[in-house]
Amino acid sequence: MGVPGNFADRAPAGLAEAELFAVDAYRTEFDTTVVEVDREGSRLRLARTAFYPTGGGQPHDTGTLTGPGGMLQVTGVRRESGQIWHTVSAGSADGDGDALPDVGTELGGEVDWTRRFQLMRTHTALHILCGVIWADYSIPVTGGNMEPLKGRFDFPFPAMSADLGALVERRINEEIERAHEIVVDFLPRSVADADPAMIRTSANLIPAAIDPLRVIDIVGLDRQADGGTHVLSTAEVGRVRVTGTESKGKDNKRIRLEVLDA
């Protein structure tokens, strides 16, 4: 489980039942029911899902949904107005969406584990980078993005150098080797807002209406609000290589990294 039992009861009502990825990043199979169909857009909304939707710089999961009509490939997952939509490849030749299941159809879902685990390792590696920069320099993040096994964060350093990149790489791998436990917590917004280290972006981009906040805690290194999927120990990340350091303008410096097998 991605959330120890003593934290699960702090989650918003219904979250653990509807958004399975939020409480167990290692879960890849689930049963569900279709609750809404967008035939024009070849999209389905499900009663519950383990597919992570694009957000917070993390790409969506992919995988399959299988039901009475056969198997559908999940090619995109997005959250719109609070609802998670799954874009699927339609089976009909003319692509009009007639092959999509009807509302009420029971489906079995399976997340592509290879992609999911690569993204988990990458996202955790970026949090380790963020924790190292905060611990050593007290500098927040100004932006970031990732793909499987590659990612980058931007920081308001006054200057950037290859030497700094090499130092950061060493520090990240040291923290990986320490095998920090990683847990998920849910904190009241008032508690999170009182901790300047909790929301690590330079501008608080999380809407005030989100309460409680989901928090990723790399125990002993980094603790911040985050909605993505992560491994349970830094040791699972493997190794990290800093592949580039760039200046993107005044007080905006970029660190790129790649996640490797141990």
Image (spheres, rainbow, N blue to C red):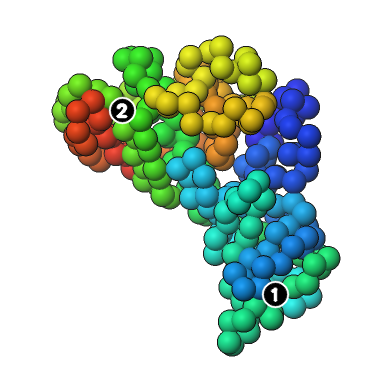
Residue sitting at x 52%, y 49%: 54
Label 2–label 1 contact, CB within 8 A? no
Report the side of 257 relative to 185 (left or right). Answer: left
Taking the view exactly as shown, the residue that stands out farthest to the top is: 194
Q: Counting other residues with Cα less than 10 Å from the Cα at mark 2, is it few (<14), some (14-19), or many (20 or more)?
A: many
Q: Which residue extends farthest bottom?
A: 93
139 over 184 or under it: above or below: above
Determine the image quadrant of residue 240. Answer: top left
Q: Nearer the viewer, residue 31 or 138?
A: 138
Is residue 202 found left or right of 56 in the rendered image?
left
Which residue has dot 2 on it? 155
Q: Say if residue 170 shows up in the picture.
A: no
**Which sits earlier in the primary sequence, circle 2 or circle 1?**
1
Residue 100 badge? 1
The percent coordinates of residue 214 (x first, y second) are 62, 29
Viewer-proximal residue among 239 and 249: 249
How far apart are the alpha carbons under marks 2 and 1? 45 Å
The x, y position of residue 201, in whole percent, is: 43, 27
The secondary structure type at the circle numbered 2 is: strand
Question: In the structure shown, which secondary structural element does the residue marked by tag 1 occupy?
Answer: loop
| Residue 160 rendering spot, x and y as whole percentages | 18, 27
Q: Residue at x 65, y 52 (%)?
A: 84
- Image quadrant containing the N terminus: top right
The number of numbered badges drawn on the structure is: 2
Q: Amino acid at mark 2?
A: Phe
Mark 1: few/some/many CA within 10 Å (<14, 14-19, 20+): many
Give residue 94's position: percent from left, percent from top: 58, 87
